[in-house]
Image (cartoon, helix red, strand yellow):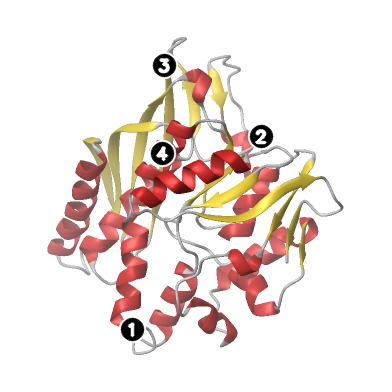
Amino acid sequence: MSEVLSGLNNIDDPAVMVSGSTYDDAGVYRVSDELALVQTVDFFTPMVDDPYDFGCIAVANSLSDVYAMGGVPKTAMNVVAFPISCLDVSVLKDILRGGADKLVEAGVALIGGHTVEDNEPKYGVAVTGFVHPDKVWKNSGAQVGDVLVLTKKLGVGLVTTAFKGDIDLVSKEEMKEVTDSMAMLNRRASEVAMVVENIHGCTDITGFGLVGHLLEMVGNEDVTFKIESGKLPFFSSALSYAKEGLIPAGAYRNRDYVMDKTSFFVEEFMALAVVTPETSGGLVLAMGADVAEEYIRLMDEEGLPAWIIGKVTEAEDSKLIVF
């Protein structure tokens, strides 16, 4: 997409604080000294069979971009593609009902949308949120000595790939755990981080996999991220599926994209697991070790997950090291 987007005309507006040029999760536009708008849009095809669950997941995924910028989502507009000649309209109704319920949970007003006919269902939302201009989180800014904190388990792409390949391979309990994780808002993970403050960088983990999104955080910063594979929280059977070769095609594309900047000192199955696309994954936050300790404590008090998965060091030959 970098090649496709390069050279496009755009106005030079000093109110634009964050744009797509930095690979951040959303754009930010300053309205006043006290208010900036956070704007994003995301939609995709179903990764679960239940239409209602799909609607919930799609909205949680879209809202996550705003949470990853330190913002509070306020309004949303549906983006829908649907094969009306092939699927009953009740399926679409369930998708939109799931999305609407998730927006209500997030306190976000649904104010419109647009629908087109397509060969397969696609759904998501365009979201506008608010943030103070001085409190925007960008994906860059991690400092030497920071630790990296993750707020959801990994392995969504591995479990859903196994499920699609053999529905009897994945237990109902594990599929429910994965579905619930995808549908869980990153709202509280973001709000708790606002309380502890001193967040030096943040992103959410989605289609580029853990490593791809961490590389976007490293960017051109003069640091290296070191990820300790033994500390990565995966769903119970996810790595077993990776060992069996149940790897989605997107993982191989992601690996090709990251290879020139990443050193892997792990087995092949683990290297593929950490580049496997995730759907509606957790936040990764860069913060000082003392702040991380307080953050994890506050998350634990609410029964919410958070794990330290790595650290930020002075720059080495590789931008990212997985060991």
Q: Is residue 82 visible?
A: no
Q: Earlier in the sequence, mark 2 or mark 1?
A: 2
Would you identify the image quadrant in which residue 220 lies? top right
Disc on res. 63: none
Dot 1 alpha-carbon crowd within 10 angstroms: few under 14, some 14 to 19, many 20 or more: few
Q: Earlier in the sequence, mark 2 or mark 4?
A: 2
Q: Earlier in the sequence, mark 3 or mark 2?
A: 3
Of the residues shown, which amino acid type is indicated by label 1?
Ser
Vertical placement of 7 versus 306: above or below? above
Q: Which residue is mark 1?
A: 171
Classify mark 3: helix, strand or loop. Answer: loop
**The furthest residue to the top:** 33
Q: Which residue is mark 3?
A: 35
Which residue is drawn at the image coordinates 46% and 63% (left, top)?
153
Gap in Å between the C-alphas at discs 3 and 2?
A: 22 Å
Gap in Å between the C-alphas at discs 1 and 3?
A: 47 Å
Q: Position of residue 116 (x, y in %)?
A: 29, 50
